[in-house]
Amino acid sequence: MPSIDLPTLLSRRASFLSFVKRRVDDRTLAEDILQGAYMRALENAHTRDLPNAESSVAWFYAVLRNAVIDHYRRRTSEASAMERWKNEFGDSEPAVPEPSTHDFVCGCIEHVLPQLRPSYAELLREVDLAEMPLTEFAERHQLSPGNAGVRAHRARAALRKALAEFCGACSLHACLDCVCKQPVHNAEAPGA
């Protein structure tokens, strides 16, 4: 028999949500944190020996405080990882989009993008081809900067693999001078 008064914890949901919202200032995030705390309470219900409902409530507020602290730690860690990633690989986002970029992109990319996972194709189109900053992509798609960076890395790796399968050796050595003669090429000869 659980020693945490779960019905009392559930009956005080509005108070708990208000407690978390004051600390994170985002209702959706507060809901997520509260749900995670309820899961933790269920997982630990049999390990706690709390004598009454008020003890359960006090314990749950401690769980909520720790959940909020963990959220801010993760966010700080993600920002730090993103900064290290940016320093390691440089800021690959051009300050001013180069409109002629598409003239130099291998036409095979448009053939292989639909074969990729839709979230990867979307990121490649918006970030790499349309030159949207990765941070803006992350905000627009409600991703953390760290998750967007990981998705970009995986999407580019998937694109490299798909191009290698589609084009062969020219994708590895001379994609800008692609000679695989696929019918989807949109590159024109200079001066045409």
Image (cartoon, rainbow, N blue to C red):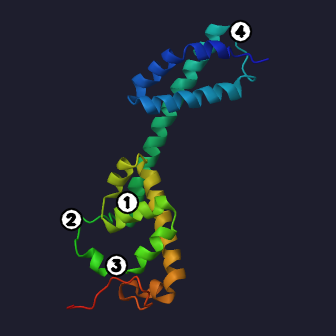
Q: Amino acid at mark 1?
A: Lys
Q: Secondary structure at mark 3?
A: loop
Quarter of the image with the N terminus is top right
Percent from the top left, x then y, of residue 44?
A: 70, 26
Q: Secondary structure at mark 4?
A: loop
Please report contact status of discs 1 and 2: CB closer than 8 Å, yes or no.
Answer: no
Mark 3 → mark 4, Cα distance in angstroms: 68 Å
Q: Amino acid at mark 3?
A: Val
For this rendering, which residue is in front, 188 or 32?
188
Residue 157 shows up from this direction: no
Quick one: label 2, few (<14), some, or many (20+) residues within 10 Å?
A: few
Q: Nearer the viewer, mark 3 or mark 4?
A: 3
Where 189 sits versus 71, above or below?
Answer: below
Q: Which residue is mark 4?
A: 51
Mark 1 → mark 3, Cα distance in angstroms: 24 Å
**Count of numbered circles in the view:** 4
Percent from the top left, x then y, of residue 173?
A: 44, 87
**Occupied quadrant, residue 37:** top right
Chain-order first, disc 3 or disc 4: 4
Residue 105's label in the rendered image is: 3
What residue occupies the far right of the structure in this picture?
Answer: 1
Q: Which residue is mark 2?
A: 96
Quick one: label 4, few (<14), some, or many (20+) residues within 10 Å?
A: few
* 20 relative to 2 in the view: left or right: left
Q: Which residue is mark 1?
A: 86
Where 45 sits versus 176, above or below?
Answer: above
Residue in the image at 43% along x and 91% along y: 181
**Occupied quadrant, residue 40:** top right
Residue in the image at 66% along x and 17% along y: 6
Residue in the image at 74% along x and 16% along y: 3
Chain-order first, disc 4 or disc 1: 4
